[in-house]
Image (cartoon, helix red, strand yellow):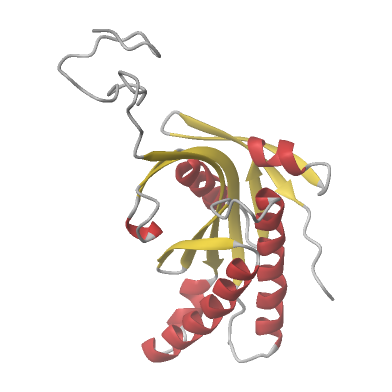
Amino acid sequence: MNCTSCGKEIKGPLHFCPYCGAATHEGVTSPFHDLKLTFLRVDLSGFTKMSEAMIAEDVMAVLNDIFGIFVQIVESNKGTIYQVIGDEIVSIFGLDLESGFAPHMAILTAEAMFNRLYEFNKKGTLKSPIGLKVGAEIDSASIFDMQQDLRNALILTKGFRKSQILQKNASSNTILVGENLYKVTKGFFSYREVGEFVEESFGVKGYEYKLKLKA
């Protein structure tokens, strides 16, 4: 039997094509939810230098304070925290179908994080100031079982990888967005093209967002 969607041969009595995921016959409901999501990855720059001058308990206290602020910003803008990995936080926008303007809210979230971190650094409690490196991109995603905790759900997408490449190549205190996010939001925000980043044959074109930090 060949898949009616992609045309590839399917061996065995399967409900879904193993190549494209399409149903093999009528009346079958896919367990996957297909959505267009915005992925935002934020990494603390200068964290290693800061932590070297502090004891472990104080480092964790600083992280908890900063990420506590960031979580509030993400959630207030209808985003969802997906993971916190060391000094990096990963969030997703677009899961709330009633939120609207999810890509734009992701950009505003990143900008709000920069402004709150600027205020945090101004307090002078840290011997070495902390910066941010941000990567964001829109991509299609298939999510298995959206009813459970999102952190345990299976999410099939290139969005995590694309936003990671952008974040890794961002300079300190910079937001890099991918081409999809740029196209959707360029009428609202200002960008400059910075070129393509290629890692392991995976290329992502980047655009730097012009930050508007509060004085």
At horizontal 46% and vertical 72% (from top left) the residue drawn is 48
Q: Quick one: which residue is furthest to the left in this view?
A: 12
Along the line of sight, the residue nearer the viewer: 172 or 205: 205
Image quadrant in which you'd find residue 207 = top right
At horizontal 60% and vertical 57% (from top left) the residue drawn is 134
Image: 168 above or below 78: above
At horizontal 82% and vertical 48% (from top left) the residue drawn is 190
Image: 75 above or below 62: above
Q: Quick one: which residue is furthest to the front in this view?
A: 27
At horizontal 60% and vertical 65% (from top left) the residue drawn is 132
Image: 141 above or below 176: above
Along the line of sight, the residue nearer the viewer: 151 or 98: 98
Q: Where is residue 184 in the image (x, y as percent from the top left)?
A: 72, 39
Q: 3 left or right of 67? A: left
Q: Position of residue 115 (x, y in %)?
A: 72, 73
Report the number of numbered marks: 0
Along the line of sight, the residue nearer the viewer: 107 or 101: 101
Along the line of sight, the residue nearer the viewer: 182 or 45: 182
Q: State which quarter of the image contains the C terminus.
A: bottom right
Q: Where is residue 167 in the image (x, y as percent from the top left)?
A: 55, 52
Image: 181 above or below 5: below
Image quadrant in which you'd find residue 2 = top left
Q: State which quarter of the image contains the N terminus.
A: top left
